[in-house]
Amino acid sequence: MKKLDLLHEEMAACERCPRLRAYCAGVAREKVRRYRDQAYWGRPVPGFGDPAARLFILGLAPGAHGANRTGRMFTGDDSGNWLYGVLHQFGYANQPVATGRDDGLVLTGAYIANAGRCAPPGNKPTPAELDACQPFLEAELALLTGVRVVLMLGRIAFDRYLKVLKGRGVNLGRPTFVHGAEYRFDGAPVLLCSYHPSRQNTNTGVLTRAMWESVFARARALAEQG
Ligand code: SF4
């Protein structure tokens, strides 16, 4: 089996964070009314995408009734509709919708991961839980050797990625998270920042379609240059 597949298996079986494992299992057991007939995944959600990706996208954590239900990154909720819609628009996905692991979705040139692999209560993993999950992010990035651009969806993803670079001894300076910001560090992919496509951001106009498409247009251009 390939190293990335083995890593995905290891993630899905992880039990390092008791609070998160109990929460995910409880949500999977109790469900919500609209999905009451579905079998929830209820486990850590591994990364998803093309092992030869040039674009690496990092979010925060699975949604309780999205990826925690379907078992695939950003699949089955509003954030995923935004993400896969734009990935299709810019040629990274074969379809604009993601409903479940058997929906036929294939990514080409892109790979998606989350800083925390288990759905957290209130969408808020603790720093200790993110620390516990950090080795998975490090291992995934080490295996994705074709990555030229990393796109951080939100400040927590940004901070987690900087921690990876710091661990590698990269000289960071003082980068700050701003939507649309772009950073270059020696020996590392170009870093791009975007607000996360959470409903809290997309319903309030903090993140508009135009802002979202503009980030992906830039990511695509940089990935093709690299
Ligand atoms: S958040 Fe990460 S480290 Fe914690 S249990 Fe889930 S997969 Fe394991």
Image (spheres, rainbow, N blue to C red):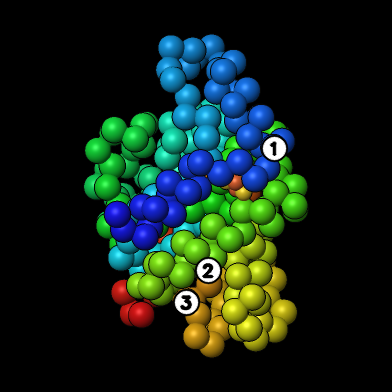
| Badge 1 density bin: few <14, some 14–19, many ≥20, Cα 10 Å | few
Considering only order in the chain, which callout, 1 or 2, is on the residue closer to the N terminus? 1
Q: Position of residue 102 (x, y in %)?
A: 29, 33
Q: Quadrant of residue 16?
A: top right
Camera-nearest label, 2 or 1: 1
Q: Are marks 1 and 3 in contact (CB under 8 Å)?
A: no
| Disc 2 secondary structure class | strand
Quarter of the picture holding the N terminus: bottom left
Q: Is residue 85 left or right of residue 193?
A: left
Which three-letter amino acid code belongs to the residue tagged 3?
Answer: Pro
Q: Identify the residue position indicated by label 1 in the image.
A: 18
Residue displayed at 33% across by 79% down = 225
Looking at numbered disc 2 in the image, what kind of residue is underneath it?
Answer: Leu
Residue drawn at x 56%, y 83% is 185
Q: Is residue 221 visible?
A: no
Q: Is residue 186 above or below residue 121?
A: below
